[in-house]
Image: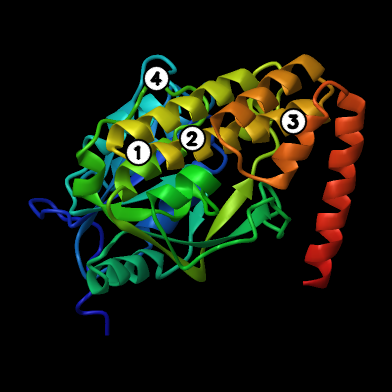
Amino acid sequence: MDTNLYPPVQEQATPVLSVIVLCYRQGEYVGPCLQSVLDQKLDVPFEVIVGDDNSPDNSLDVIESFRSRYPDVIKVISHDANVGFAANFADTVAMAKGEYIANIDGDDVMLPGKLQRQLDFLREHPECGLVVHRMRTVDQDTLESVPYPLPQNKPATFDAEFLIKNGPYFFHSSEMYRAHLRHRSPVDVGLKSVCDVAHLLQVVFGWQGCYLDEEWGLYRVNRTGMTSTRINNPERHREYMADMIQTCQIAADLGMASDTVNRGRAKFYLTSAIFYLEHGHEDNFEDCIESSWRAARISTKQLVLYSTRRWPRLSRAVYTRLKQVTGRQRAHA
């Protein structure tokens, strides 16, 4: 019998865990998301805090229907204007009362046992400030498994220095962390497109992050989400670039070594250079690869693209060839 397991937080109880749900235009999916959270069984009381960023659809109606059924469990922040992901996250996480915080986006799903597994892990590993896990990437409507381009290198442990140089290899919805680490630095609400790396740096700096190679959630691949409309849109990619360079400044302000920060800058500029090269924006490609080279020398790929930057057609041909060779090597690995 589950006599030692709590439902979500009861009236007067102090939550040990706060679950942060961020929602924007996810009316079709936020209900299953919230239900998957409420169905979790834990040995401590927990609360659910939902931040809706002025969704133009029925997201808020769905959220309010859950709050009416669980008034002592669910708290809702409803913005009167669209404030963006970072500000919505900042306002929502500021309300967290728990010792631990877990994140989930409003269109994703937790699998049974997820929260207890991560909570147990953090209790058993006091050196770990953040624990994340593998998620199954699924079609937003059919829930059938679909591929998603995540890095292949997924170390069991990582730190802030790893993240600034390589970026995350897991999803926002897989995170659970110690609340005091999040609260020691303000969320940078000036970030417009990408705030996840900055958030992770602030949480993990001086601590260890841990990765569970275990599937504890479903990540919906949204074909019209922010990734496709901003990061992968050549006209709006500079907004993403600005956020990533600001993220490097956040790392420097935290006290990270300048050599490490510069390698992070070089990596972000290189990524953007390749993006512009693939999309035929030759002037932007040249600017980015030169900025990458000035920041730090980081790879043969960077050297080749920098050396051929005056001849973008050659750069594109060489890069295409490098991708083909790398792909074959991975296939035989």
**Position of residue 58 measured from the top left corner of the image (x, y, whole percent):** 51, 29
Image mark for residue 262:
2
**Residue at 18% in and 47% down:** 180
**Position of residue 224 measured from the top left corner of the image (x, y, whole percent):** 68, 32
92 to the left or right of 298: left
The alpha-carbon separation of the residues under discs 3 and 1 comes to 46 Å
Q: Nearer the viewer, mark 3 or mark 1?
A: 3
Nearer-N-terminus badge (3/1): 1
Secondary structure at numbered mark 1:
strand
Secondary structure at numbered mark 3:
helix
302 to the left or right of 260: right
**Position of residue 71 measured from the top left corner of the image (x, y, whole percent):** 23, 43
**Residue at 51% in and 65% down:** 155
The alpha-carbon separation of the residues under discs 2 and 1 comes to 36 Å
Image mark for residue 190:
4
**Residue at 88% in and 52% down:** 324
The alpha-carbon separation of the residues under discs 4 and 2 comes to 21 Å
Residue 167 seen in the current view: no
Residue 2, picture quadrant: bottom left
**Residue at 26% in and 31% down:** 186
